[in-house]
Amino acid sequence: MDHNATTPLAMEVYNAMQDWLIPGRVQNASSVHMEGRAARDTVEESRESVAQALGGKTREIIFTSGATEANHLAIYGATEADEHVITTAVEHPSVLAAVEARADHSILPVGVDGRVSVASLADALTEKTRLVSILWGNNETGVLQDIEAIGRLCRERNVLLHVDAVQVFGRLPFRVADLPIDMITVSGHKMYGPQGVGALWVRTGVSLVPTLSGGHQERGRRAGTENVAAIAGFGAACERLPALLSEQERIAQLRDRLWGGLAAVDGIQRNGCADAALPNTLNVSFSGVEGEAMLMGLDLAGVSVSSGSACTAGSLEPSHVLMAMGLSGQHARGAVRFSLGTQNTAEEVDEVISRVLDVVERMRRAA
């Protein structure tokens, strides 16, 4: 129950990658010989699959090594060093790091529900603001931002909007062509594809300076030999999008079933807006129990969960997302994130509830 960290590889994805993992096979899509042209065909077929899944144009897709690189390409590639950039306090660490590296930046606060106020964004916009970067679905809490309202405001002020949609892609239906956004980040391994591959969609007409230079790959926007096997897997994962979306109502019911069973625990608190959230994510805090200890206890009980972002695992600091939402250090340290996927069942949810109750009881007795 840790699908926001990564999802298991789908069989269709595995099969698509196998042709490019055969020992001795040539995989450089920039080569002009027959083997190189076959690799190029696979890359372009996958680009079309990603574009169709996003509802954009094929030429608007830039393949990257993952979401972190895509986020950095959007932020550094679309702004000059002296231009103003805005983000929120609950972003993924890769966005916060990139934005904070800019001399002129603003980090907007969020409410107790984890959502940023569109009015506060309007107040933060200046004549020097070039880019707003927003995480659509939070990886820790599942809270969804009002991307359409934020996008309309950015359009009115002639400001670019970059959206990190890593957790939303495959869980909520959308078409980039219908949204008031300019760039969007997606990742393969969050939607049953391989790790090490992602994409940045860039609306036609948006100027982007490459952050990796040297080669002319990706239409000169991202240098480096393409990872053909991973890109083939990403394309296959995107072709599964209709099936993934059809599962989300069932997964949301499982999440609600999980919360219904855990809500009976004394001292439990649900973190984040329940009315605007990813269908698979539940973040809760248990008073009197450390989240990391809870993770270890559940791991020993055969339940895989997380205390927050996998990218900050091992940190002794409480979640920056939960702290930004106004939780106390104690509650933030006692947080556990459950993130469900297509393989989870109602029987598993009931078993998880039972094991969580047992672990919480044992830990509180030992405290």
Image (cartoon, grey):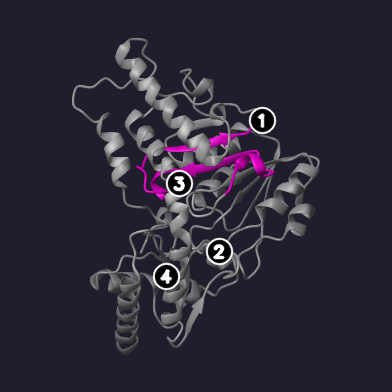
Label 3 Cα neighbours within 10 Å, binned few <14 / some 14-19 / many ≥20: many
Q: Residue drawn at (32%, 52%), measured in percent from left and top? A: 8
Q: Report the residue marked by disc 4.
A: 254
Instruction: Choose the circle earlier in sequence order: 4 or 3.
Output: 3
Instruction: Choose the circle earlier in sequence order: 3 or 2.
Output: 3
CA gap, disc 4 and disc 2: 14 Å
Q: Report the residue marked by disc 3.
A: 241
Q: Report the residue marked by disc 2.
A: 277
Q: Is the C-beta separation of discs 4 and 3 under 8 Å?
A: no
Indicate the amino acid at tag 2: Ala
Give the residues drawn in magenta, as a range.
174-203
Is residue 182 magenta-colored? yes
CA gap, disc 1 and disc 3: 27 Å
Q: Nearer the viewer, mark 1 or mark 3?
A: 3
CA gap, disc 2 and disc 1: 30 Å
Q: Is residue 97 above or below residue 63?
A: below
Is residue 95 magenta-colored? no
Q: Residue drawn at (60%, 46%), measured in percent from left and top? A: 163
Instruction: Choose the circle earlier in sequence order: 4 or 2.
Output: 4
Indicate the amino acid at tag 1: Val
Q: Report the residue marked by disc 1.
A: 206
Residue furthest left in the image: 23
Residue furthest top in the image: 33
Q: Say whether residue 71 is visible.
A: no
- The location of residue 271, given as percent across then percent down, is 53, 72
